[in-house]
Amino acid sequence: MAGHEHSHDDHAHDHEHSPSHSHADVNGGHGHGGNGGHGGHGHGGHAHGPGGHSHGVAADADRRWLLSALALIVVFMAGEVVVGFAAQSLALISDAAHMLTDAASIVLALIAMRLAARPARGGYTYGLKRAEILSAQANGVTLLVLSAWLGYEAITRLLEPPEVTGSLVLITALVGIVVNLAATWCMSKANRSSLNVEGAFQHVLTDLYAFIATAVAGVVVLTTGFARADAIASLIVVALMLKAGVALVRDSGRIFLEAAPAGVDPDAVADRMVTEPLVEEIHDLHIWEITSGQPALSAHILVTPGGDCHAVRRSLQRRLSKEYGITHSTLQVDHVGEDEAGALLQITTPADSTPEHCADAHGPVHRAGPHEH
């Protein structure tokens, strides 16, 4: 069996630092058959030193802020459970239950951060970076399940409101606002570009809104005796939890389903790439996210016969980094009609209106000039 040879002349090391992420890990494209396509590996490093990290906050700093928020939440939650049962307040008990999920979400975020920091090895060629997305999705699902349970309880209490001690509800809610403001501030200092941290942050932020609603309910019960205000406050909290939960499940689901990053139109990116000089056609284009804030792209590029494939590849990689913040790209570059013996894909000329590059087409074919997507 023939050995696997790497020609270092074909591997360009371009250091393009995107505003969104400074890590470039560009994998080479392997051609089909003995000749192989013109692929390239370019590895940009992380910028270290003051202000060098693209996220602006070190992972150690993230962990410190998360641990500070966790301590605040756990201590207050224990006291709130006792007061909630004493006052017979669903709003307080629901807040305490939500704070329990806050604590769990932060613990999960910390575990996910630890796993994601492990280097790639063995079969996990991206490492465990998507552990953070699993954490974010778990946080979203937890919010949805909890909102369903609290919604049911709140509707039950609207129909048959129990006696509620308004003074205890108000005092506890006011203390809760202070504690959650402190916890929210701690969470805001962490790197929220990570969907994992954002998931934990949304838990704590929703809890802050919940305490504000509970405090208002306490004032109403205390001044008017309207006990249903407690259940109404719970329903407001449920609505906020549903909103945050749906957003987290949707965003994490996009990453798991290999969708393009939000706000990035693959067709528009391909149309922009095909305007590069010497590029005749782009197909098999894929754009996805490895984890939040780390977009990746792969594509098969056909250039004019005799054109400099390596120069085209380097130029496209610079454009992707500068214009779209995509610093992890895999580009297989070939000449139109190259290797007619069949070792490579049977590539047709742009004049052919019905080209088929493989049995299973992976998206539209993009060419210069007007064309259908």
Image: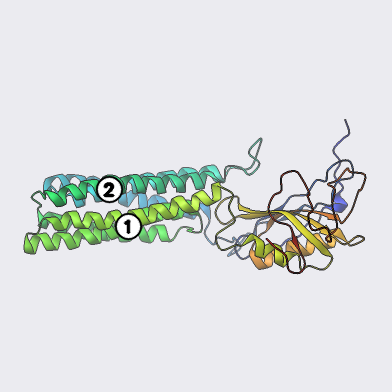
- Name the N-terminal-most of marks 2 and 1: 2
Tell which residue pokes out farthest to the top in this image: 1
- Name the side, left or right, on which 121 lies relative to 70: right
Q: Amino acid at mark 1?
A: Leu
Q: Is residue 342 left or right of residue 324?
A: right
Residue 258 appears anywhere in the view: yes
- Residue type indicated by callout 2: Val
Residue 103 in view (yes/no): no
Residue at figure coordinates x 86%, y 41% from the top left: 33
Residue 114: where, in percent of width, then height?
51, 44
Please give left or right for residue 228 compared with residue 369 in the image. left
Front position among marks 2 and 1 = 1
**Count of numbered labels shown in the rendering:** 2
Label 2 Cα crowd, 10 Å radius (few <14 / some 14-19 / many 20+): few
Residue bearing the label numbered 1: 240
**Position of 188 relative to 158 (above/below):** below
Q: Residue 242 or 189: which is nearer the viewer? A: 242
Above or below 319: residue 166: above
Residue in the foreground of this view, choosing between 302 and 188: 302
x and y, in percent, of residue 298 in the image: 71, 53
Quick one: label 1, few (<14), some, or many (20+) residues within 10 Å?
Answer: many
Q: Which mark is residue 259?
A: none
